[in-house]
Amino acid sequence: MLRDVVVRRSPLPRIAALLIVLLAFVLRVIQLDAQSLWYDEGYSVQLSRTQGWTQIMLTTAQLDLNTPLHYWLLKAWMYGAGSSEFSARLLSVFGGVLGIALSWALGRMLTGHVGWVGALLLACSPAAVIAAQEARTYAWLGSAALAATATMLVAHRKPSAQRWASWAALALLTLGLHVLGAVVVGLQALLVWLGQRRARGARAAAATVMLAVLVVVLLLLPYRARYGVSFSAPADVRLVGAGTLAAQVLPRALPQPWVTPSAFVVSTLLVLTIIWGAQRHERRQIVALLGLSLVALVAFFAWSGKFSARHPLIVQPLFTALVGIMMQSALAQRRALLIVLAGTAAVFSLAGVLEVRRSPVYANEDFRGALGYLREAIRLDERLILVSGHFAPVVDYYWDRSQSRHIALPDVPLLDLGRMLTYEEVVPVLNAELRGRGGAWLLLWQDDVIDPTGLVPELLRRQAVDLGAREVITRFHGLRLVHYRFFQPYQPLPERIPQSAARVVVNRQQVGLSSVGCAAPASPRAGAPWIEVWCFWQIKPFRLLPAETQVSLRLIDVAGSVRAQQDQVIAPRGLPYLPYEKPIFAPYFFPLPADIPPGEYAFHIVPYTAEGEIAPQVWLPLRILPP
């Protein structure tokens, strides 16, 4: 009897718990501000610190298709802690550390032993560490989902109206942190409704949660159409499934060679956990909840086409805790072996954390470095242009707008494939913002999606001193910075596609390409170094054509003789790989031979692929003026 009392009062479990929590905190707080905020973090911080409480709710519902609780928490936090990179991320650190304590408690409830293994694995998990080092909701979201799960287990063991009300409150908290919380808490509510028919207060709590999930879905439903154009859909179920599983052990970006083996490891651990959970009813409930949540997440990602390795983190603490609990339960009588296995797993996880800190694969885009450089380099007569403009919030965080106002193309805060840039959308903005200016800086991120034809760089390049000069600064990770110094103050461009006198000839079967027409911005003079010709091509309805499609440019005299010829890429970036059905701006600078006399000519433009010429061909009348 005395021995049992001594064991129960042993300080070792408390010391172990304190050490694991301390380890988790240290891993998450070290180098917390070493990297720049990336787009999502900048969006969170700027939204939280610049908008009011009501406006945050409206913005998240209409633009983010999300629930506002994390933005509210971050706003309240920054009132006292400030909005520096370290301060904004510190809130997530505490959310991540909270999950360690919850994992410990869940392990004790499910096994009767001290739940140190699950807590240790979660403390050292690279995915959990990185989630807790971002000014985003995912660390708190995972901990809230884990807290709701543990509370559901407590209420199941000792039913009471108060305990079921506590579970409902935590489920609503999870839903408020992110709309994907509906997946986990909705399934929890369904399990409670079906399995707790006689428990006092259980069905009322479950009905409350299900009603909240329904309300959130109905409120966001009017904006579903916008969600559909913001991301490509549907996605490949196998790829999304592998990515969802791999995200339980891999942080953030998923290096492709690691996805399949990581998904295999997670699948194996899930099978073992299911076998372990089959031994007791309450274990079966928790394991079933995890499995069903993963299936529901994969189904949602595949349907919507929107997948990020951060999204499955809602169940990552529960998955990691259950793996640790399963190990501890299975090896409870072989303590030495358990310590060796858990210690080995922790060491490998710590090595993963170290690799994440060193590997450029996991490095944030260096907005801080790029904008710090620009503050020193930009001239008073220059402007900063952002493509895609949706990353303007993180630029606002680092950029002093009193020095120079930046231009966002397009001027929307979220990536939206419905706003891919077109000539008639971009040129009026450039004309208004750059008129009379001597140069521009172009900051590019995800521009291959929003500006697939390279429209903005080409419009700026044609005004530069040297048409071949592009100063691309590559030392800012993930970003391209291009400086254009104009050969004269910026000259406004036609804000509508110029009317074309060209003749379009369809001399063979068309394979998707069509021509809006071609025009010369100005009549060239004999002796000039080149002729400038603008063409506008179109692929409508969209059909994927070779990106390397080229055109043969031929200068034809009145006798029908070819006086000069040159081949160029059909458009600045070739033909787009995304469904882009708007006119594609294609400026051609054609070297003009010195011996070409003034007179009437025709410019013959012939597109072709590796298989040969394709339709249509364009004939543009051209007059070369006297020198």
Image (spheres, helix red, strand yellow):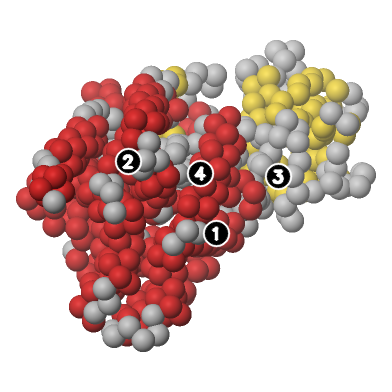
Q: Earlier in the sequence, mark 4 or mark 3?
A: 4
How far is the residue under mark 3 from the one under mark 2? 62 Å
> Is 328 situated left or right of 158 in this image?
right
Q: Earlier in the sequence, mark 1 or mark 2?
A: 2
Residue 472 x %, y %? 45, 21
Between marks 4 and 3 in the image, the one whose residue lies nearer the viewer: 4
Packing grade of label 3 (10 A; few <14, some 14-19, many >=20) is many
Check disc 3 and report its element: helix, strand or loop: strand
Decide if residue 194 is in sight here: yes
- Name which residue type carries label 4: Leu
> Is 513 situated left or right of 396 in this image?
right
Between marks 1 and 4 in the image, the one whose residue lies nearer the viewer: 4
How far is the residue under mark 3 from the one under mark 1? 44 Å
Question: What label sits on residue 269 in the rendered view?
Answer: 4
Residue 197 x %, y %? 40, 85
The residue that mark 1 highlights is 295
Between marks 3 and 1 in the image, the one whose residue lies nearer the viewer: 1
Q: Residue at x 32, y 83 (%)?
A: 199
In the displayed structure, 306 sits above or below 386; it is: below
- Name which residue type carries label 3: Trp
Q: Earlier in the sequence, mark 3 or mark 2?
A: 2
Count of number-bearing discs: 4
Residue 570 x %, y %? 71, 33
Question: What label sits on residue 537 in the rendered view?
Answer: 3
The residue that mark 2 highlights is 117
Quadrant of the rendered image containing residue 41: top left
How far is the residue under mark 1 from the one under mark 4? 16 Å
Packing grade of label 4 (10 A; few <14, some 14-19, many >=20) is some
Single out the residue that lies furthest toward the top: 594
**Mark 1 touches mark 2? (CB < 8 Å):** no
Between marks 3 and 2 in the image, the one whose residue lies nearer the viewer: 2
